Amino acid sequence: MQFKSSLVTGTLIKRYKRFFADVELDDGTIVTAHCPNTGAMTGCAEPGYKVWLTSNNDPKRKLKYSWEVAIDSAGQFIGINTHNANKLVEEALIQGKIAEFASWPEVKREVKYGQEKSKIDFLLSSEEQRCYVEVKSVTLLQDGVGMFPDTQTQRGQKHLRELMSIAQQGFSAAILFCVQHTGIEQVKVADQLDPIYAELMLQAINTGVKVLAYGCDFSEKGIVLSHKIPFISG
């Protein structure tokens, strides 16, 4: 996934009101950028972090800049834009870079399904079978381990229930953690932050839902889903 415009670099002053980030650009100019991440962003938005912004000259936009990447004090790259997770996975699916899904010939996005009126991120299909894939972005790092979720998530709980129902019907179902933090070496469920999600995850795995995690590579040109990362269950 390539960035839509050349990057503008600077230093984070603060992130506030969820959607805003004040940044001092390398030339000393202070700007307010859109923060495309409504989550807690624990460890991802510390003042002093280096940041990469994209710019947009559309006069209809309230903010010219969007925050795409942070670089923490250890030099690790963090994907801030959670909307990029599905774009990265879609690109990798189409290019056959995710080995577990490479055999599925058809890929569809945002397909309605389930008893709780959900939309699956990706529906993979062949003439004989279907595979439902839910994507989750992971950026919370604790001692080299990526944790999901970073806060209680009723939406995530619903998705697990839906995937369990799909698996019980005889279809393939999977969760793919898109890890947008280069410091994360393995992924596990943050049971201390959402014990209900953790319990549902164990039930989902026992029902046959597959759980995968893939990491990303970052450059000034863009981000790519690149390598498998271990998922720790239990």
Image: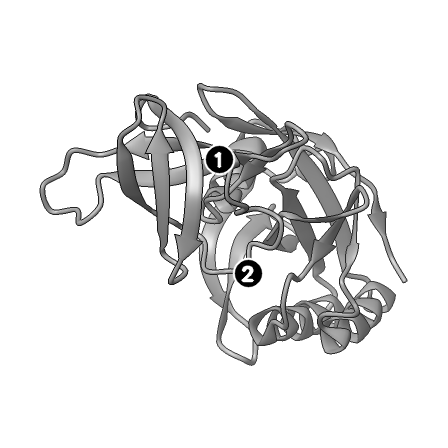
Identified at 68% across, 40% down, the residue is 101
Q: Kindly give the residue lying farthest to the front in the view shown.
A: 28
Q: With respect to residue 12, does 192 lie above or below?
A: below
Q: Which amino acid does label 2 sit on?
A: Ala
Q: Position of residue 199 (x, y in %)?
A: 81, 74
Q: Which element carries disc 2, helix, strand or loop?
A: loop
Q: Kindly give the residue lying farthest to the left in the view shown.
A: 59
Q: Position of residue 29 (x, y in %)?
A: 26, 30
Q: Earlier in the sequence, mark 2 or mark 1?
A: 2
Is 183 in front, or is 85?
A: 183
Do labels 2 and 1 touch, CB within 8 Å? no
Q: Which element carries disc 1, helix, strand or loop?
A: strand
Q: Distance between the residues labelled 2 and 1?
A: 16 Å
Colour convention: one colour
Instruction: Examine the image and state in which quarter residue 207 appears.
Output: bottom right
Instruction: Examine the image and state in which quarter residue 152 appears.
Output: bottom right
Residue 40 image label: 2
Identified at 57% across, 46% down, the residue is 44
Q: Position of residue 171 (x, y in %)?
A: 70, 61
Q: Dividing the image into 4 quarters, which one contains the C terminus?
A: bottom right
Category of crowding for the residue at label 1, using alpha-carbon neighbours closer than 10 angstroms: few (below 14), some (14–19), many (at least 20): many
Q: Position of 182 compared to 124: left or right?
A: right
Residue 21 image label: none
Q: Circle 1 is placed at which residue position?
A: 69
Q: Position of residue 37 (x, y in %)?
A: 45, 53
Q: What residue type is labelled 1?
A: Val
Category of crowding for the residue at label 2, using alpha-carbon neighbours closer than 10 angstroms: few (below 14), some (14–19), many (at least 20): few
Identified at 39% across, 40% down, the residue is 67
Q: With respect to residue 11, does 47 lie above or below?
A: below
Q: Is residue 228 visible?
A: yes
